[in-house]
Image: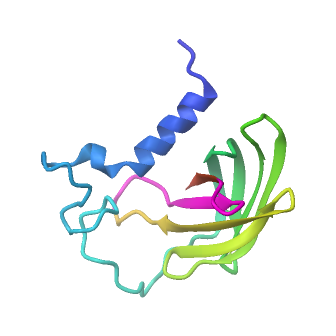
Amino acid sequence: MLLSKRFLMTLAMVLVTAPCLFADDDSGSCKDKDGDSDGHNAAPAQPAVNAPDWSGSYSAIAVGFYCGKDSVSVNAAGKLHLQLSLKDKGGNGVNFNVANLDIVDGHFKGSGNVNGVKIDVDGRFDAPAPGQPWKIRFICNYRENGGQHAGRIIGIKD
């Protein structure tokens, strides 16, 4: 049985963004064991002594008003470049371009454009704990046109 691309992208967004689905209790709360809702049961992060190397290429999936798959990168200077060829809800091709975002303590925020219209993004990187099998990943939200068009981009380091 073949699954549609839209279904797979939606499934990826739900799995990555809904830690409440995997709660250990029946309280219905999205808070995890350390009291926040980030899906990690660890003490709040302290400034990293040896920050992870975010640089490299990432496979990314965008969902929401703009959808698609593309590659994004973090250069050696630690600047994130979200430059993706996506499609809008009408199926029209668009260029999503937010470049030179500084990564500070694993977080980033900035503005760019989609076909000339201003877009704002904010997100974070997650690095695996020592010995964990998963790769570095990022997740960010985007909002365009005063919040009228929005969505999320998820990426995993290649």
Question: Residue 147: within the magenta?
Answer: yes
Q: Which residues are magenta?
A: 131-148
Question: Residue 100: within the magenta?
Answer: no
Count of picture labels: 0
- Seen from the viewer's position, the closer of residues 123 and 133 is 123
Residue depicted at x 16% and y 49%: 24
Residue 120 occupies quadrant? bottom right
Question: Is 141 placed above or below 7 here?
Answer: below
| Coloring basis for residues | rainbow
Residue 8 occupies quadrant? top right
Residue 158 seen in the figure: no
Residue 64 occupies quadrant? top right
Q: Residue furthest left?
A: 26
Question: Is 12 placed above or below 81 here?
Answer: above
Residue 69 relative to residue 96: left or right: left
Question: Is 92 placed above or below 136 here?
Answer: above
Residue 93 relative to residue 128: left or right: right
Give the image location of residue 7, x and y in percent.
Answer: 55, 29
Q: Residue furthest right?
A: 116
- Seen from the viewer's position, the closer of residues 31 and 61 is 31
Residue depicted at x 64% and y 56%: 58
Residue depicted at x 35% and y 57%: 132
Give the image location of residue 158, x and y in percent.
Answer: 61, 53
Residue depicted at x 75% and y 42%: 88
Give the image location of residue 32, x and y in percent.
Answer: 23, 60
Give the image location of residue 15, x and y in percent.
Answer: 41, 43
Residue 20 seen in the figure: yes
